[in-house]
Structure formats: structure tokens, C-alpha cells
Image (cartoon, helix red, strand yellow):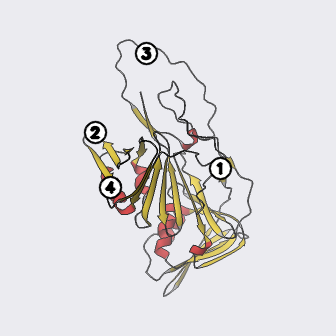
Amino acid sequence: MNQQVCSNIVDLNKKPEPTPEPVTTIALEAPPIVEQKPEPAPQEQPQPEPVKTDTAMTDLHPIAKKEPEAPSATAYFACADANQFKKLFDTMHLLQNEVTFKFDTDSLTVRHMDPGRVAMFGCTINKEVFEEWNVTKPGLCCFNAEEVKKIVFGKPFKKDTIIGVSVDGEHGRITFTLKDNRIRERSFPTLEASLEDIPTPKITFNAMYKITAKEMAEDIDDIQKLSDHVTFIGTQDAFEMKVEGDYAKGTTTYKRGDCQLLDIELREESKAMYSLSYLKDFIDSTLCDLIIIEYSTDMPLKLTMLSKFGDLIYYLAPRIETD
């Protein structure tokens, strides 16, 4: 499986240099940052509480660029399990209402970032995964995924439902066909498509844990009741999730040898904080059985879901606590 989501990124093994600003958040295509001398704080003024904020993925690599215009694709593929494809589709458009399919002769690629540049998604699905596959003209197909979700994927399908997806680049249409004891077609206009060249963070991950998806999803859902962020603490013998809310705090620990923790690879002990709202959406135990968590101290998280469609990969920027 090709896990490259992006390319041409500076080496991120070094942490970002501290700035005098209390919070560092550089949005994509933002104007240059101008350093300003901080005003002296009044004497005997109480120190402010630490601020927790999501950094942006683009704080950690150069500005993304638009690739040259690609032709509109003409293609067709079919999946025998419409409910599994529904779950894949939900995962594909978590970060963007508009989704771009990139068709090559032998694969389908989806890659994008959320508007706040905090999270990144990428997957490449080989044609062998689908029951039918025919790409007449490689290229792009962009469409409103939110509308498609409401109209096509609004409820579960019958177990024997087959779904086909047809892209007509010449007339600018994408059509979803559902086949069981009847045939239903839903056709939508495509949008102007241009694929953003999103660099993949070049990070040396110091901690890796392979965990069963079912338990991880349950625990993330549970600890979200306590706080909106979680701290990952990785050691040689355990992976710990620590949360502290306004009224309660808690920890969840997976120990080496537990049936939920299948593998550990550690270069050095690592600790980083991430948004629980993103993690809750990312982890889907109905789509995969295992997930791989990779991260380093105060660096982006790489989360890989091992699904029947291949590796579904998310990157998530850390939350930084500053004075």
C-alpha cells in the first residue's frame, strides 16, 4: 500500500523554534509572520493560565501548492458491499464537504486537509479491491460529498446491495447506482477540480503502538465525556491516554502483553496532546479491526486504520500548551 500522502516537505525532526507569541498558529497561505517585541507585563500581575490550542499542520511544512490542472476523469467502479463502501465514504469526507477522487488506471486516491489545516487524510485504493473497475480516462472528479451523503448514504442498505459509481467527465456528472431487488440511480453535477499538492510531514516517529480498533474507539468515546483533549504517554511497556477536565480526570492504559495492545516499537518515551473531537471521528471500528498510532513528543500524530480497502491514514497536529 502506498502510504505517501504528500511530498517535498522539510525535515520535521526538529521541534519548531519558540516564539514570543503565547500561541503559534500559522494558517495555510497566511501572510509572513512579523516578530514583535512583547510589551512588559505590569508588576505583580497574576500569570495567565496555560493556553491549549491546536497547531496547524502547515506550521510544520511549507505552503501547499496547487498541482497543474488535471483532466476530468471518466471511470466506473463497483463494490459488492454497499454498507462497507458507505463507511469508507463517511471516512473520506470527514474533513471536507467537497471531495476529489483521483483516478489512475489502477487505483483511486483521495487526499485532503480540513479548512483549519489541523488534520490531513489520505488513502489510495487499488483496483483489485473493487468487483468492477474501468478507467477510460484518468483524471479528477470533484463533487459535493455532503449532498451525496444525505441523498445516497442517508441510511443503511440491504445486505445484498451492490453500489456502482460512474464518473462522466465529458458531461460533468457523477452517478451512484444501488442494485438489489431494484435499481436506483442518483446523479450529481461535478465541481471544478484541482488537486492540492499537500506535503506529507517528514517526521521520525519515536513511538508506535498497534491497538485493537474496537477497544480504542470505545475508550476514546468514553474519555471525551471528561475533556476535549487527551495526552498520549508512550513508554516501553505501556500506552496511556490521560485526560483532565474541569470536574474530573482519568487515565486509560494499555499494557504490554494485553490482548488489546498487539505491538510496541519505541525509540524514546513520547508525550503529546491531541484533540478528542478529531480522534473520535477518525477511529471507526466497523471499518477496521486494528489501528496503528505513531507519534513523537509534541509532534503530529499519524493514525493508520488497516481496512479492507487498504491503509486509511490521518495526520493530526498536536495541541500546544504555552504560558
Question: What is the CA distance from the residue labelled 4 to the residue labelled 2?
Answer: 19 Å
Classify 10 Å Cα crowding around label 3: few (below 14), some (14-19), many (20 and above): few
Question: What is the CA distance from the residue labelled 3 to the residue labelled 4?
Answer: 42 Å
Residue 7, numbered label = 1
User: Circle 2 — which element?
Assistant: loop
**Location of residue 194 with respect to 117 vertically, above or below:** below
Q: Position of residue 176 (x, y in %)?
A: 57, 74
Position of the C terminus, as image quadrant, is top left
Q: Amino acid at mark 3?
A: Ala
**Location of residue 77 with respect to 122 vertically, above or below:** below
Q: Earlier in the sequence, mark 2 or mark 3?
A: 3
Q: Amino acid at mark 1?
A: Ser
User: Circle 4 — which element?
Assistant: helix
Residue drawn at (56%, 38%) of the image: 59
Q: Amino acid at mark 2?
A: Asp
Position of the N terminus, as image quadrant, is bottom right
- Residue identifier under label 3: 41
